[in-house]
Amino acid sequence: MINTKQLQQLMAGKKPTVGLILGSGLGMIADTIDTPLVINYADIEGFPQTTVAGHSGKMIVGKIGKTEVLCLQGRFHLYEGHRPQTIAEVIAALKILGIKQLIITNAAGSLNPAFAPGSLMMISDHINFSGQNPLIGKNNDLIGPRFPDMSNAYNRDLRRHMNQIAERLQIDLPEGIYLMVLGPNFETAAEVRAFRTLGADAVGMSTVPEVIAAVHAGIDVLALSAITNYGTGLQSTPLSHQETITNAARAADNLTALITTYIKEL
């Protein structure tokens, strides 16, 4: 279990209310945090470790504008061998630390020809195709209910505010459905066709367990995808993680502008 008392000591009196979880190649958002306190995951008792390129494995606590934030620069994927319950434990720790709102970013493959690599998508709903759930097992009634409602998982009010910011900044931010697969392999062309039939606009290997756990914990969620490639069969070149990192960097400037503006206006 994560030692939240030790973590509070490491945070040196800082009391963040907004959490950030950054996806592959999107760590530059953390560079906007003022007076940052950097805590390595390895220094937190019971905290899981990340193993994927583009995820540095650091917790950064500081301010964006007048709002204190806690940023996880590196997430935990089920394909790394993490139990889904581990993700729930991380989110529960964020709740105990005082996080009320969670902003999640990810790198995702496009299933919608209108969503090109290098663009952004705000997640309005998801399809959990991973076969996993972070709430399996005995429920922690101190964190949330046994059967959490998911009808407003991606909070409508937060999305409305972000849409207004995107319009002011003249950044294209369509909404779409995110489908999670377990990974780590990229999807086949047949799977991509099936996912499009199900109504998904983007596909990735993260985010959904974090969202489920956050909704369970009563934390409001806003999530954005950096579109890094077209799904298999929608582009002629083979997919690679390097392509994910490269195209995430293309989207990172707009994503950073959106998120920092949003937090400064809270």
Image: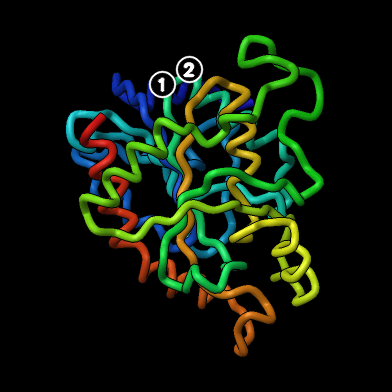
Local crowd size for mark 1, using a 10 Å CA cut-off: few (<14), some (14–19), many (≥20): some
Q: Residue 63 at x, y = what percent?
A: 23, 34
Q: Which mark is residue 222?
A: none
Identity of the residue drawn at 69% across and 70% down: 186
Quarter residue 82 falls in? top right
Total labels: the figure holds 2
| Quadrant of the snapshot with the N terminus | top right
Per the image, label 1 sits on a secondary structure element best described as: helix
| Quadrant of the snapshot with the C terminus | top left
Q: Which mark is residue 5?
A: 2
Q: Residue 2 at x, y = what percent?
A: 58, 27
* Identity, as a three-letter code, of the amino acid under mark 2: Lys
**In this view of the protein, can residue 40 be seen by the observer?**
no
Identity of the residue drawn at 68% across and 78% down: 232
Identity of the residue drawn at 59% across and 61% down: 202
Q: Residue 170 at x, y = what percent?
A: 24, 58
Answer with left or right where residue 137 lies relative to residue 255.
Answer: right
Most extreme residue toward the top is 142
**In this view of the protein, can residue 207 be seen by the observer?**
yes
Local crowd size for mark 2, using a 10 Å CA cut-off: few (<14), some (14–19), many (≥20): few
Q: Nearer the viewer, residue 168 or 221?
A: 168
Q: Residue 142 at x, y = what percent?
A: 63, 10
Q: Disc 1 designates what residue?
A: 8
Answer with left or right where residue 218 lies relative to residue 30.
Answer: right
Q: Nearer the viewer, residue 223 or 172?
A: 172
Identity of the residue drawn at 58% across and 37% down: 211
Per the image, label 2 sits on a secondary structure element best described as: helix
Marks 1 and 2: in contact by CB < 8 Å? yes
Give the CA separation, mark 2 to mark 1.
5 Å
Answer with left or right where residue 10 lies relative to residue 180.
Answer: left
* Identity, as a three-letter code, of the amino acid under mark 1: Gln
